[in-house]
Amino acid sequence: MSDEGLEFGTPAGRWVITAAVLGSGVAFLDGTVVNAALPAIAEDLHAGLASLQWTLTAYLLTLGSLLVVGGSLGDLFGRRRVFVIGLAGFAVASLGCAVAQSSAILIVARSVQGAAAAALVPGSLALISASFRVEDRGRAIGAWSGLAGISSAVGPFLGGWLIDSVSWRWVFLINLPLSAIAIAVTLRHVPESRDEDSVRHLDVLGGVTLSIGLAGIVYALIEGPAGASGTTVAIAVALGVGGLIAFVIVEARSPQPMVPLELFRSRQFSGANAVTVAVYAALGVAFFLIVVHLQTDLGYSALAAGAALLPVTAIMLVLSARAGALAQRIGPRWPMTVGPIVVAIGLVMLAPLDKGSSYLTGVLPGMIVFGLGLSLTVAPLTAAVLAAVDDHHAGVGSAINNAAARIASLLAIAVIPAAAGLSDNFTDGYRKTLLISAGLAAVGGLIGWMTIRTATPVETTTHTPTGPSCHEPCVKIDQAA
């Protein structure tokens, strides 16, 4: 690899994207495919409702609480190394899930899966950011987001076929060959990247306090709506808030913090994460409710409801790389403003769906607009986050953004449907919830306009770096708001 990095569209660049997509894809696939297996798991393992809930919760809890730690470890010890370790751990945990003879063993294995995925998800983006030259990162991230999204869409179909044709255990066994291929491609074709000049120092106290803080918040958001006692939820919230406060204090005093607080002084980094919170809160609720509404009110089968979302995936697959390239040329401000607003328009179009609504005239137009908005938003948003941090902190920057997206989605699912009265009248509550989600997406666009800077065309320079975080090639940024 040259000093400038890989070019998009070259064989070497395609191999890096392939490795990143395969690695993150197994984690994304597992997030959706397991849902289809729950009834079969309940019958085979004689698992009750609480055990089934924890089969999902254990994965989300460890993933959400360890994302930033996983990203930081990649920055510190090598992104390829941590990525491969995460893949290997995910494969071993998947085997544990597949051979589990009790719900308790399955839950433990699922928690290990989540911990391994915490190294994969931020690591996949960090590999792309570190491997590609600056002017091609937007297109590479766009290609990653479009291709990785397929795994989430394929999940319900693949899961249903494996469960009906073979066994629910193959939902987990399928991860073994996928992980093995990803490891082989990564070791052969992905260059290692880390800060060679830095002194290796693991911020143990920072990692512990942050993990406790995020675990407490994620637990409360998952278990609160599931019916956990008020006392349990209050204790989880107190632990979460206390852990996060302690984390900020620890990082402010640490000579080598896991998460340098200076990152948040960047208006673009903080603004992009604020956009993430608003947009992914809207998306979390929308994806959850639209599929349920299609089945309960419009009479779709589970397979048909999943297929109804395929236009969104197809549009993202075709347009994500182009949106990333556009943001690379004109800067992320316009895509991150227009994209969330188009998402909001799509949600408004989907809100009136009711019995008798046809797919072609009622569902499809809203899905197309929704998909166009997502394509404009996701890749530029991710690229803006990574562009706002120096190369040393690509992993932790990606991890913070992923954690923000997941926690925002969980919070929205816990709060917005209840606020819209969904439990009292599902159809009316569905409309109100989607309109609230549309408002959140539009707010995300407004935040993007106010906080994201407009970049001038990328110029590769060979001058002496002007600061510790400026590495060749550098990108000139227009400071206008």
Image (cartoon, grey):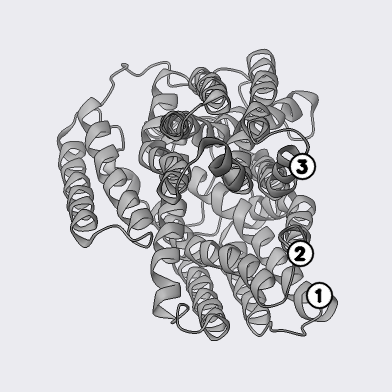
Above-or-below relation of 344 to 235: below
Mark closest to the chain's N terminus, 2 or 1: 2
> Would you say the residues marked 2 and 1 are in contact, meaning their CB atoms lie under 8 Å apart?
yes
Instruction: Identify residue for label 3.
Output: 161
Residue type, mark 2 in image: Ala
Q: What's the distance in space between the residues labelled 3 and 2, CA to CA?
A: 18 Å
Disc nearer the start of the sequence (1/3): 3
Provide the residue designation for mark 2.
Answer: 308
Quadrant where the N terminus lies?
top right
Q: Which mark is residue 359?
A: 1
> Hey, what amino acid is under mark 3?
Trp
Q: Residues within 10 Å of mark 1 (few under 14, many from 20)?
A: some
Rendering coords of residue 133 (x, y %): 64, 33
Q: For the residues marked 1 and 3, what is the alpha-carbon distance in whole angstroms?
A: 24 Å
Q: Mark 1 vs mark 3: give the one in front.
A: 3
Residue 148 lies, with reference to residue 348, above or below; the image says: above
Estimate the x, y position of residue 93 in percent, counting from the top left.
51, 24
Question: Could you say whether the residue bearing mark 3 is in a helix, strand or loop?
Answer: helix
Report the residue at 43% width, 44% height from top: 51
Q: Amino acid at mark 1?
A: Tyr
Residues at marks 1 and 3 touching, judged by CB atoms closer than 8 Å: no
